[in-house]
Image (spheres, helix red, strand yellow):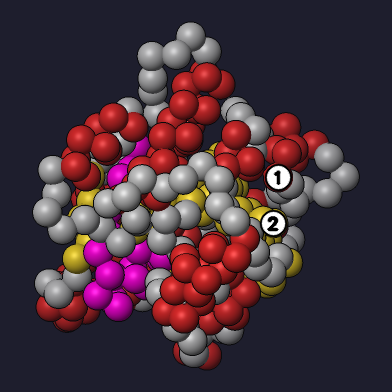
Amino acid sequence: MPQKQPYERIYDVARDSLYKILKNRGKAPELPLLSLPSLNKKMWGIRKGRMTLIGARTSHGKSAMALQISIDLAKQGKKILFLSLEMDNNEMTERIYCNTRQVDNYHLLSGRFEESRQEWDVFLEEIDNWSLVFSDMVGKDWKDIDEYLSNMKIRPDVVILDYIQATRGQQRTQKEQFDDYILHFREMAMRYNFAGILCSQVNRASQDGKTKEPELHQLKGTGVLEENSDVVILLYYPHKNDKNESIHKYKIFLEKNRNGRTGYMDLFYYPQYYLFTETEIMCERVQALKNAEQENNGWEE
């Protein structure tokens, strides 16, 4: 392959590389989010060769959102590598079971698995066709990911890391460690042509302000996250700060979207299922959730 020249005349760029890119773009995103169609339209899907950041405070749903994205894309036949630095593979699979089959997580926690046994059999049949790979051991160091990907014959379409603040490195300070990891993760996304998704914490101190909603500058640990992310999604679960707020009310902020739209939208969140929707789910499900809330004094993620 000929080496790319450091300088290119605009006419040559337009005639050669850009023309091919524009001509080959489809009328639908390559990696669409079908479970959240309005967000998908605004973001124009998840993009290969780019880095998407999901930011939220602790227990505001970033892991649940990352898992729902992996479910969404796995159902479409995409190849997903999900690296978790805080949950083991069993916990991630249990959450996916709750999400896909709408099985109450409290029932599983309290030993009532047999009540959903029929749903379990359907779940096993469905996921048998998915190309979703978990690891709760790889990802602490970006070199581990690089080595793993370099040895794969068929590489993933999407790599999700949950979460950046749990990584490690050889740098002298934590900030240097984060910066090094983020830069290499983005470089790998470009080199191996996968859509990279990083989860990040938002500083708890941001809760002391007049507005509790997260902002870009509150991402924990480093400014390199904001600078190098092509897309930044910030999540906010009002019920965590105000128990008078509906347990289903949720907000998502598309704070950065390189070459695309930004803005915010309201979602419905069903923490019993680790599930996000753009419209309320069927009435009987909603009533069941309300009954469960009364029985168990509210739900936590």
Q: Secondary structure at mark 1?
A: helix
Look at mark 1 in the image and give the residue it sits on.
216
Q: Is residue 41 above or below residue 143?
A: below
Image vertical order of residue 239 relative to residue 131, above or below: above
Whole-percent x and y of residue 281? 51, 85
Q: Is residue 12 magenta?
A: no
Looking at the image, which is closer to me, 157 or 255? 157
Residue 216 occupies quadrant: top right
Q: Measured from the top left, where is residue 253 in percent x and y?
A: 68, 61
- Residue 78 part of the magenta segment: yes
Q: Residue at x 30, y 36 (%)?
A: 139
Which residues fall within the magenta stretch? Answer: 67-85
Q: Amino acid at mark 2?
A: Glu
Query: At 34% from the left edge and 71% from the top edge, which residue is drawn?
Result: 73
Q: Does residue 237 appear in the picture of this structure?
A: no
For mark 2, what is the residue?
255
